[in-house]
Amino acid sequence: MPNLKPVGLPPSELKKHVATVHVSGELSLLERKIVNVLLLNAFDELLTKKRHTLPVGILCTMLGFDSKNHDALKRALLKVMSTPISFDLLHDGGKTDWEASPLIAYASIKNGLCSYEYSDWLAEKLANPDIYTLININVQRQFSGGYALALYENCLRFKRTGSTGWISVETWRRLLGADASMYDEFKHFSSEVIKKAVKEINQVSNIIVSPEYKREARRVVQIRFLVEDNPQKSMYDNAEDQEQKAIRDSEAFKRLTMLGVGDRLAISWIQQEPERALQTAIYVEEKAKRKLIRGNAGGYARTVFEKGERIEVTSHGKGKMELPAASPVTPPKDTSADERSRRTSDAIKALSLEEKQRFALEYMAEGGKGNTYQPETGTFKNALERTAYTSWLRARIATATR
């Protein structure tokens, strides 16, 4: 079977089959976000793996779901599994193809890990979309309304052409999930769904949409949305490019991918815990050199990273894992690459609050993005901003400690 992995696709963007965008709007905001995040996580291995996994903590972060209420996640997964989804692919000529399938065939949450499966038919469809929309998961997190996210997904594909084209009011209601009887009257559909969704999209996303209406006998029968780039939100794309480059240039990313860890997974680890990601790579490298790993080094690295125990590298370069109560790392005695890396990590951990604040201000003065800088801790709240800063700080500290 040929490798259908898309080339050059940013790890925070989902190449989503348009048939799954133009979907009956029975999904809530959380359920729609879950569908996108799980598909993004599985995309590279849709044709090679039956079961996919994602730590619940990372799932919640990608969803922008701060609550630890895992019951809500379970209910959302169950709804996604049990809701028959009708896929209506809107062709340019107005004709519609119809196919139906549940979006997820199996799901479980056990020991902090979300596992799930797609049917073979659906996996093949999703892995090789002829027509697709790129959904940015970082933008998706900004949405708080289900109608807004549904409209955003349905409009995003038309950014280049500038318009969705004329679509009947009934079809828009179905696509957005606005099937309540109160929306039979267009004025309610317009004020409660269209206008509010448009306002949210234009405030939080990277596009601007403007509705236009076609009337027959003074009754609105069709709507089209004009779609253009949002110049005020171009920072999403620019910041994404800079942050992705910083991650891909990092030592942790290079070492993890050399071990066979997938690009998306490596980036996800670095975004969540950059220090742990690097220590995982060093630890697994040492195990591999001593031929102590059975099977795939990338798979072993995933087990190490997600196990939750403290990872350390001794002064002789031999990796070990210890519980959080373990004794401090022994100071390095040589200048190997592993030791220099550990020495840099130790120096960063030893920084006082005043030093952290000073370095953060220096980083921002040099042009680093600091929209979520927290002076009380000297850190950045946003994971991507924190990753870019950590990469800069490691280089700064490494130079000072040589």
Image (cartoon, rainbow, N blue to C red):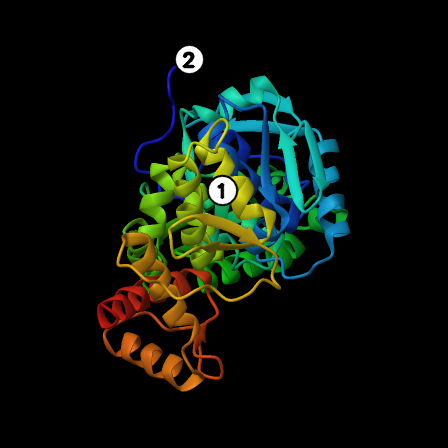
Tell me if mark 1 has few (under 14), some (14-19) or many (20+) residues whose alpha carbon lies within 10 angstroms of its own.
Answer: many
User: Residue 310: horizontal and vertical position, in percent?
Assistant: 55, 56
Which secondary structure, mark 2? loop
* Residue hosting label 1: 154
Picture quadrant of residue 109? top right
Say above or below: 321 vs 23: below
Q: Amino acid at mark 2?
A: Met
Quadrant housing the N terminus: top left
Q: Are marks 2 and 1 in contact (CB under 8 Å)?
A: no
Marks 2 and 1, how far apart at CA: 31 Å
| Residue 268 in view here | yes
Which secondary structure, mark 1? helix
* Residue at the image point whose x is 29% and y is 57% from the top: 242
* Residue at the image point whose x is 43% and y is 55% from the top: 314
- Relative depth, front residue between 125 and 148: 125
Between circles 2 and 1, the one closer to the viewer is 2
Quadrant housing the C terminus: bottom left
Q: Is residue 340 left or right of residue 89?
A: left
Q: Amino acid at mark 1?
A: Asn
* Residue at the image point whose x is 36% and y is 58% from the top: 236
User: Residue 295: horizontal and vertical position, in percent?
Assistant: 49, 26
User: Residue 218: horizontal and vertical position, in percent?
Assistant: 56, 49
* Residue at the image point whose x is 58% and y is 18% from the top: 120
Q: Which mark is residue 1?
A: 2
- Mark nearer the N terminus (2 vs 1): 2
Q: Which mark is residue 397?
A: none
